[in-house]
Amino acid sequence: MIKIQSITKSFHDRMILNDVSGTFEKGKPNLIIGASGTGKSVLLKCIVGLSKPDFGQVFYDGRDFYEGDRDLKIEIRREMGMLFQGGALFDSKTVEQNVMFPLDVLTKMSSEEKLDRVNFCLKRVGLENVNRKMPSEISGGMKKRVGIARAIVNNPNYLFCDEPNSGLDPQTSVLIDDLIQDISEEFDITTIVVTHDMNSVMGIGERIMFIFKGQKLWEGTKDNITHSNVKELDDFVFSNKVMSGLRGK
Amino acid sequence: MIAEIGKYFMFLGNLFVNREAFRTYYRLVMEECVSIGLGSLFLVALVATFMGAVTTVQTAFNMVSPLIPKFVISQVVREMTVLELAPTIIAIIFAGKVGSSMSGLLGTMRITEQIDALEVMGINSVSYLVLPKIIASILMYPMLVIVAGVCALLGGYIVGIFAEVITPNDYVVGLRYSFNPFTITFALIKSVVFAFLVSSISCYQGYYTHGGALEVGVSSTKAVTNSVIAILISDYLLAQLLLAQ
Ligand SMILES: Nc1ncnc2c1ncn2[C@@H]1O[C@H](COP(=O)(O)OP(=O)(O)OP(=O)(O)O)[C@@H](O)[C@H]1O
Ligand SMILES: [Mg+2]
């Protein structure tokens, strides 16, 4: 479980996040949603420690990330896996080397063990026979999947995904969403997914946090998102035609 | 400017905290050595050979007095190339070739979030990415300078003979005449300093790239400019420190 408290962050006197608190539960995807530019990515970066909040705390199963010393930070980091928006694969390494990388650097496993683990993870995300390909030779959706494989290869306790399905076709999006949900349940991972895709929200949104202009305005599930009585959330949810149709009913 | 230099030193400080296992670094350093050393060998040899050749011809052209013995030509070539041209001019070439590519690589890794990915894995991205490059530069650049020195003297020899400005015998006599071995030591000290400056400054510029492809280009340019400035300033300071009696 990850708990955040009063996260506040400004860039050049412009407040991006204003006092955001909440909890993210184990074993399921926790969604952070909101319009473009509201600070979702900044919030995620504050949670994983890529960008230090001006104020506020992040607890990983009770361990205070920012108060901890360097060793604690590294210990927590080594329990994290992260899928970046663009995949962030190392482009000088093959798919196999990319997925194996965390094992190479962080563990003392033997080569066979590592290879087994890599192949297991690649298979888990539905990729086979791409081990020797370079990141530049595979499609965007495949990159995302390799990114997921790399994020889960070292058995993380915490998984972070920044817009896992932006730029993907609806079918692949659903596949990726389901994959994230399955993996979270299967390995009991605390997963945080940043998205602005309503399809994902309605698909895997068991726990949703809605961010608007740097503030948390609403929290709930996909079942009660359509009758929240928060105007900003309604604007966000019903911006698309299908959803507006739902509202009419 | 001052803030920038402070940030650079903090960056250097980060190199030595929380490193990974030794074997990880060993492999990375070897890979960098191959790419830095072998990758620059041809260009360095080419430039150095021509440098030696041109220095020979020009020195010969300027020495019109029959009172000056011919072997002075190769003595001048030796002093100029070994002491100044090989370490310094090759360092500027090194900045243009190796420095800009280091900065471009790190800049690209930064904007495509590959550096963030390393950080999230709990790896110190500064020491993982930058330390091997600096170590490999410090190991390989002095060797390149030695190659450059040899090539320059060889280039001078060949041209001197073909252009008939000096006999082979005179050339060799000149090379050995009142030779002070400290010039070699001095050249190697300079090479180590230049290698460190070029690699660390270039990596610093690349590592702190913000934005997109445009900024990666800007970082590479800055890496070369700042490296060259640092080379020239430290060249002067070292000469003052080590040569002035
Ligand atoms: N390093 C930074 N320096 C200055 N401003 C920043 C920085 N990072 C983000 N911002 C600003 O913070 C705001 C929120 O950005 P953020 O990337 O979190 O948006 P987002 O909610 O993730 O949007 P999207 O859905 O488009 O990805 C933006 O207005 C952006 O300009
Ligand atoms: Mg974003």
Image (cartoon, coloured by chain):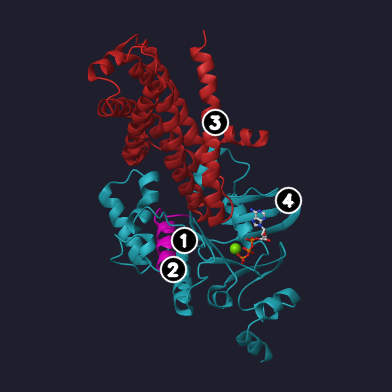
Chain colours: A cyan, B red
Which mark's residue is nearer the viewer, 3 or 4?
3
**For residue B73, above or below residue A126:** above
Corner quadrant of residue A68: top right
Q: Which mark is residue B225?
A: none
- Do marks 1 and 4 share a subunit? yes
Position of residue A231 measured from the top left corner of the image (x, y, whole percent):
75, 76
Residue A86 lies left or right of residue A2; in this view the side is left
Q: Which mark is residue B230?
A: 3
Query: Which sits in the foreground, B88 or B241?
Result: B88
Q: CA distance from mark 2 to mark 1?
A: 8 Å
Which mark's residue is nearer the viewer, 3 or 1?
3
Q: Which residue is mark 4?
A: A12
Q: CA distance from mark 3 to mark 4?
A: 31 Å
Q: Quadrant of ligand 1?
A: bottom right
**Amino acid type of the residue tagged 1 in the rendering:** Gly
- Do marks 2 and 3 share a subunit? no
Q: CA distance from mark 2 to mark 3?
A: 42 Å
- Do marks 3 and 4 share a subunit? no
Is the residue indicated by label 3 positioned so its CB lies within 8 Å of ligand 1? Answer: no
Q: Which residue is mark 1?
A: A87
Q: Which residue is mark 2?
A: A140
